Amino acid sequence: MVAPFISFHLVHQQLDEREVQALEGVCAHRHHADACIDDYIERHQLNTGYQVRGTLKEGENLFGITDPALLRHTTAYFSALRAAEILWRKAEPPFGFDTLLDLHGELFGDIDPFAGMLRTYPEGIYCAPGLIESQGEGILFRLQSDGYLDGRLALLPGYLGDLLALHPFARGNRMVIHLLFEQMGRFRHWQVDWGALDLRTMAACEDEAVMGRGRDLSAYLLPAICPKTQSGSTR
């Protein structure tokens, strides 16, 4: 069975039978992501000798993939495999800005040569690149002061919107920020019911929150958050 967090982020990608079996195996701790990624590279004959020439902004990738659909699929599949391995590990604090960088590097490092590196160019309404680190550290320090939302789950949508407004990376922001909160919840014994949420609706609400209109995100997300007992079952 694929973890709900992963299924939520894969909803718009159609995995083939071999990919599904591989992902289920990693989720069940029967397979290693490295072996599954190597198998995919071989099956699709990806260019492992490609020399990266582009920049962070240009969307370069480690295999020189130029087909947008293949790049989206490969990125989604590889990051799902890595997320499965991360979710097997014990979630432990601190969940600081360095944690966010490390998670991004681990999720996307198999495809993105700039994984774990902060955005260095202006991007629309999002945080200026020179302020991303200081702003991010401040947000995560406040999250730590709030006990990683232990008993304060109503604050989650606000913090989520604040981190998304940073847009710290060129790609993969939504998934890695969601994963950071997933790890906090595992540590503090609360969880998001990802199966109760729709990715497109969630993204639309998050975009509104980035614009300073967080009411829709709170209304949509909060009913899907619930505390857990120490054994992991919901109360």
Image: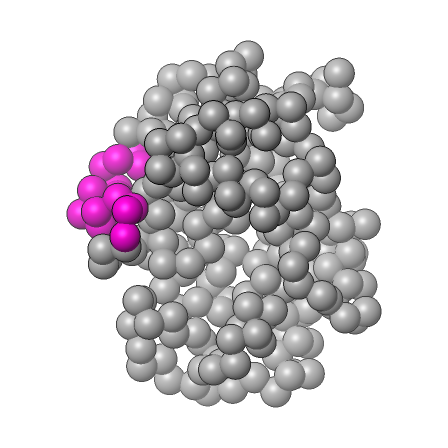
Spot occupied by residue 168 in the image (x, y as percentages of width and height): 34, 48
Q: Quadrant of residue 13?
A: bottom right
Q: Quadrant of residue 97?
A: top left
Q: 139 or 194: which is nearer to us?
A: 194
Q: Is residue 131 magenta?
A: yes
- The residue positioned farthest toward the left in the image shown: 130
Q: Is residue 231 above or below residue 172?
A: above
* Residue occupying image coordinates x 71% and y 36%: 196
Residue 29, horizontal then vertical, whole percent: 75, 51
Residue 56, compared with residue 166, is above or below; it is below
Magenta-drawn stretch contains 165: no
Query: Is 65 rendered above or below residue 213?
Result: below
How is colour applied across the structure in the image?
A: one colour
Residue 53: x %, y % from top left: 31, 81
For the point 63% across and 31% down, which residue is it? 192
Residue at point 46%, 87% (across, down) = 49
Q: Is residue 48 visible?
A: no
Q: Nearer the viewer, residue 114 or 223?
A: 223
| Residue 4 visible to an observer of this rendering | yes
35 with respect to 168 (left or right):
right
Q: Residue 106 location in percent, x, y?
A: 49, 55
Q: Is residue 1 left or right of residue 45?
A: right
Q: Which residues are magenta?
A: 124-137
Seen from the viewer's position, the closer of residues 29 and 142 is 142
On the rendered image, what quadrant is the C terminus found in? top right
Q: Residue at x 55, y 68 (%)?
A: 72
Magenta span: predominant SS is helix
